Amino acid sequence: MPPPHRFLASRLQGYVCRACLSKSQVTIRQQPIWLSRNATDGRRRTILKGASQQVDPQEPEIRLFEQMPDGTRVEVQADLLNGIEGQLRGYEENGHSVEELVGPVDFESFQDGDGQHYSYDPKLRESMDAMTKETEELEALVEKLENIDLGALSAEDRAKLREELLETATTDRSPTEGIPKAAPSPAPRCESIALSTRVNLLPIPIESFDKEHRTHIARLNQALVRNQMTAGRALASRSINRDPAKHLWKAYLLCQNAIRSSPHAIPPRVWDILWEMFTAKNESNLDRMRRIKVIGEDMRSAGIHLSPPRMLLYLESIFISGDRDIAFKEWKAIGNLPKDQIPFKEYYELGVRMFCQVGNVEQALRAAEIYLHRSQDPSRFRVLLPVIQAYLNLKGENSVQRAWALYIRMNFRFGPQMTMGDYDAVSKMFLTVNQTDLALGVFKDMMLTGNTSAAEQNSTAQYRKVVGVDQLGSVAIQNRELNWENPRALANLPAQINNRFFFGSWIKKLIGDAKLDAAKQVFDLMQARRIKPDSRHMNGLIGAWFRHGSERSQNLAEDMAWRMIRARLDVVKGRNAAAAYDLEGSTRVVKTDTLPSSKPLVLIPSATIETFAILIMEYRRRQKSALISELLDALRRARIRPSTFFMNELLSWYARIHRKGWAWDTYYVLSRELGVQPDFITYEILWMLLKKAMDPVRTSSSKQQPESFITCRKLFADMMERGGKEGLPQEVYDLIILSFSHAFDQTGTAVALRALQQRFGMYPTLETTRTIVLQLARLGLTDDRGIKPKRLNIRKPLTQERIATVTRILEKFREQRVEVLSQQGIAFDELQSDAKAEEMLLLLSDLLRYVAHARITAEQRHNYNAAIASKTAAEQMGVPDCVPWVAYNQS
């Protein structure tokens, strides 16, 4: 509907026309007229009472209506409105404002960010009954307030009335207690105000601020109320557009100047709520540190004492914002407080992080040492993690030695209780600065955790042997700990784990953590240590590179994969040469100093079929036909038998380029000659190709069966012979029935229904019934020229009539079956699960037999009937025991 005229905007807010309301499933309550008139800003038009008073002829007459839940609108009586507005006008003429008592009502706060009313939340239904009583009590309170002559009240009486209202809002007693009884008033119900006033919150007094700021303060009060209402609700039950913290932050920013001008007018409880909301860690509080800085500055300006935990959080926010000198000054000032008032752990951890951030590692180490001496918690050694990172970031002389010395102390005192996250953090630090040997030592310590030989083989034991330091209880680093240069001496691996599988487990973990660059560093480390990686681990890294998707990752993946393929071809070539020259034994690489080579020695594992499968999947996705041909040639020369996955990817590629004949030939060669076992994904691809081949839209009317492809019965026989015996997907089941339907093979369809039921326990669905009915409705259908149409237009009357005829025949078979079952004492409608599905299968089988018998009779074939046809089809389809019509007749 078009937007209302601006003259009526204040009174039509929230109105929905009947046309829009009829389309909506949500009943939006009409805005209460009496509240909208109270919520004006002082520019309200004066309503003249009495017949003798003249009305401005240029001013249009306004008639107000209230829309009922059923969509009808009822005119609001003018006497009621004039009476209420007359009292309000008299109160304002005395120099007072209604906002001084209750504050302005902002209905925009009950709307979402797009200006739309909140959608109905079904979960609020449970709480509506509980709110009804409070709503009625509040209505009674409002009615009594309307009968009070506000203009005759003195300042003392108004203050007393306000205190009683505040006491009502912050206690659980009835809101009508302490208010004189008055005659009932026809004021309408308003559940929105009931929601916003019955909250355990002392609002900000509006009268303490200037008039130009009172509107923003009122909105802040409403935002605080909304926050309290939604605080206990589950996150999933909240509307997406409603974010109390976001609205509260906006409301706070709008009245920030007013608050700073009168900071003492804010109650302490309000400051606490604002602090809790702005410091909460959640997804909506993305700018958390900036909000903490703002609220912290305002609270300190207002003279609110920040407790030490809050002060530390405030210091972190101003440090992050760039005021680092102030942050350090305040941090040192907190250190002068009595020890029992300082949160010991948080204080020193914050100091260590700040000093490390600015590169003052020595000061950070001193703070960490004080903390370690004063605490007995073993986890206190985690405070060394930022110090280790800071030393590595310096990249100065002996910085790596100092960082490793601190790790050794951390491992010595905290080793048994170190978590995988601790080890990951340290190893990532050393990998980032390309200290792979030291990172290997950290990973070794993690793998040896809980091992009985860990005390003799971990990095701490080797550090003591190489450096000669026994006292590791203090963080003080001795000079002799800075003399070592070769990190490999500190990260020697025990013989039992110095192999490709140990490094492979590290690569797998890094791949799982999405740290592909670190995994590449581990591969380079294996090359440096002359350890040949395992093909499985390299295939995993290649696949992770491809999944990452960047150009650099794709280049690394392709380069590694083709290097592995060339390594495999070299193995095959060497094997052929050894056989040709009758050489025995295997060759190995020997390092020599007399025969230098300019080529670096790289130990690359040979490619496996998984390598080829990963490449063909990637090339198929990127439609690289030339590379796929090159890959297939390399697979032939590598003499590797394809896998099921590789065959499926190859068949999918042929299906993509519409090479159905190639697909079947490839499947036959790989499955029959090379022994590749197909799975249901293989048959889903083949049935999809067959369905497309049999689709009359894709084939000419003169050639129904394509060349160089298989028939439905042969493919079904192959699937029943080589396929699994359980787990047939529903998609494959539907493709099978649809393919037989496109081939107009009623006998094969009946055999397939019974065979799939016996082998996989699957019964026809509604989609199956629809496919068979449309198949039979299409049978024999031709146009005026005698040509079979390529599409079955179900909108044509002739088509609809044929479908209705097939449906009537099926219904007739159903009635006959119901009668037979009733004679046996069985109610057809009471059948459940498999029994009912079995009856549906029999009905479809009878329908197919009826049509097959009619076709055989029309062809005048002697000594041939539907029973013989079903037996022949069952034998051709590889299921001679599934002859549905013979078995049904015998029963």
Image (spheres, helix red, strand yellow):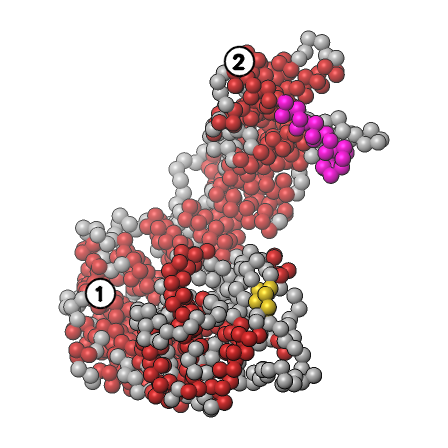
Side of 91 where 156 appears, left or right: left
Q: Amino acid at mark 1?
A: Ser
Label drawn at residue 691: none
Quadrant of the frame with the N terminus: bottom right
Q: Is residue 226 visible?
A: no
x, y percent for residue 280: 36, 70
Residue ID for mark 2: 891
Report helix, strand or loop for mark 2.
loop
Judged by its main secondary structure, the magenta piece is helix
Residue that appears at 43% across and 56% down: 125
Residue ID for mark 1: 379
Q: Is residue 561 visible?
A: yes
Side of 282 where 364 appears, left or right: left
Depth check, front residue: 350 or 780: 780
Residue that appears at 45% across and 33% down: 582
x, y percent for residue 78: 57, 74
How dense is the environment of label 1, judged by Cα within 10 Å: few (below 14), some, or many (20 and up)?
A: some
Depth check, front residue: 356 or 69: 69
